Structure formats: C-alpha cells, structure tokens
Image (cartoon, rainbow, N blue to C red):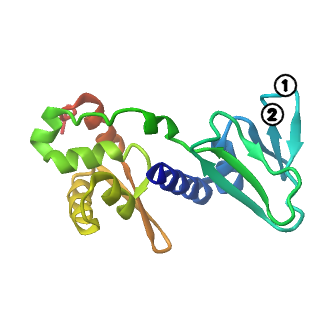
Amino acid sequence: MRAVLDADLGRRAVALVDGGVEGLFAQLHGDVVWREGELVVHGRRRSGTAWTVEAGGHGLVLMPSVFAWPDVIVDHDPRTAASIRYPAAGVGLLWEEPAATRAGLAAVLGRTRATLLEALGEPLTTPGLATRLGVTPSAVSQHLGALRAAGLVATRRTGRTAVHLRTATGTALTASGSVPPGN
C-alpha cells in the first residue's frame, strides 16, 4: 500500500511541476474541477451535488487513499487546513498478482532490469523502486543508469528527489516483450 501511495505522490508532484495547479487537479479525479480559481468537487452519491472547497486561509491537504475508491472524500467543515482524500492512482494493482516479467525481455536485459522497467509504468523514486523490487537503492541506481543510457528510462529531479519513468521506447519494449523495430 505504501508503494502505491508513494508512487501517487510522485505522480502528483510531477503534474504540479509540469502543469501547475490546473494540471494537478485536471489529473486528480474526474469529480474534482479547478475552475476560475475555485476548487469544486462533484458528488457521486448524491447526483447533482457539488461543493466548493473552502480552505479558509489555512491551505489544502491532498491525501491519496487506497480505501477511498472510487469516491473523493472532502472535509466539509475543517478547523485548520481543508482536505481532500482521493483514490490513489494504481490502487487496483494492490489486489492483482504481480505481472510476470516477459521471458524474452528478461533474457536480454536481465531479470532485475526487466522487472524495474515494467515497474516504471508509473513515476517512482529510487527508494520506492528498491522497496518494490527487494533490492538495495544502490543496485537500483546502477540498473537505472544502464536503462537511462539505453534511452529506456527518463529521470526528473525535483529538489533532492529523483523520479523515474519509462520513456516511449521503454514502454514499447515492455508492451511487446521484444526490441522495437529500428533499435
């Protein structure tokens, strides 16, 4: 659960850096809309119900949850910062068996690099990858360096945190289980 929540936080950080507040809320949840400087949440349980989230000068806390799916939960009467709990991206993966790494891809890249490449379908940090793969962060860094040099992984730094994601070539490679034509 922690890995899914950490990955979601990384994804939201990238969305905020790339698209600002509008970009962040555009990707957060279908019921959440940023419109003309106001944050509006539409309710599913009561059709037609919408709330404008009032931060009251105390800020807004966004909390990914593995238990909120498919709804967004809004603190309607905050004493301090307003809060929105939303379903973490990838929460469905918690209840699935891990995908087996394709044998052909593992034969070319090695099992750890192939598994790492498959995991990078969502933005993850080095410690997050290490936890997910059960290897040391230094081993993950070495594998990421090789995958980055091959053009299969891109890394973006935000402050002291590095977030890694597959490139289009890396995605094509994992989708087919073989090397794409021309490479």
Which residue is most to the top?
A: 47
Q: Is residue 35 left or right of residue 124?
A: right
User: Which quadrant would the C terminus be assigned to in this image?
Assistant: top left
- Element type at mark 1: loop
Q: Is residue 97 left or right of residue 83?
A: left
Q: Give residue 125's mark.
A: none
Q: Quadrant of residue 149?
A: bottom left
Q: Is residue 164 left or right of residue 19?
A: left
Q: Residue at x 11, y 42 (%)?
A: 108
Q: Is residue 21 left or right of residue 125?
A: right
List x then y, in percent, for residue 121: 39, 43
Q: Residue at x 36, y 47 (%)?
A: 120
Is residue 140 positioned above or below 47 on the image? below
Which residue does the numbered mark 1 point to in the structure image?
Answer: 47
Which residue is most to the bottom?
A: 160
Which residue does the numbered mark 2 point to in the structure image?
Answer: 43
Q: Residue at x 33, y 38 (%)?
A: 171
List x then y, in percent, for residue 105: 17, 37
Q: CA distance from mark 1 to mark 2?
A: 6 Å
The foreground one among 37 and 1 is 1
List x then y, in percent, for residue 75: 81, 51
The foreground one among 114 and 154 is 114
Q: Label 1: how many residues lie within 10 Å, few (<14), some (14-19) or many (20+)?
A: few
Amino acid at dot 2:
Gly
Is residue 92 positioned above or below 38 on the image? above
Amino acid at dot 1:
Ser
Q: Residue at x 24, y 69 (%)?
A: 138
Count how many numbered circles sit on residues in the image.
2
- Element type at mark 2: loop
List x then y, in percent, for residue 31: 74, 36
Q: Label 2: how many residues lie within 10 Å, few (<14), some (14-19) or many (20+)?
A: some
Tag 1–tag 2 contact (CB < 8 Å): yes
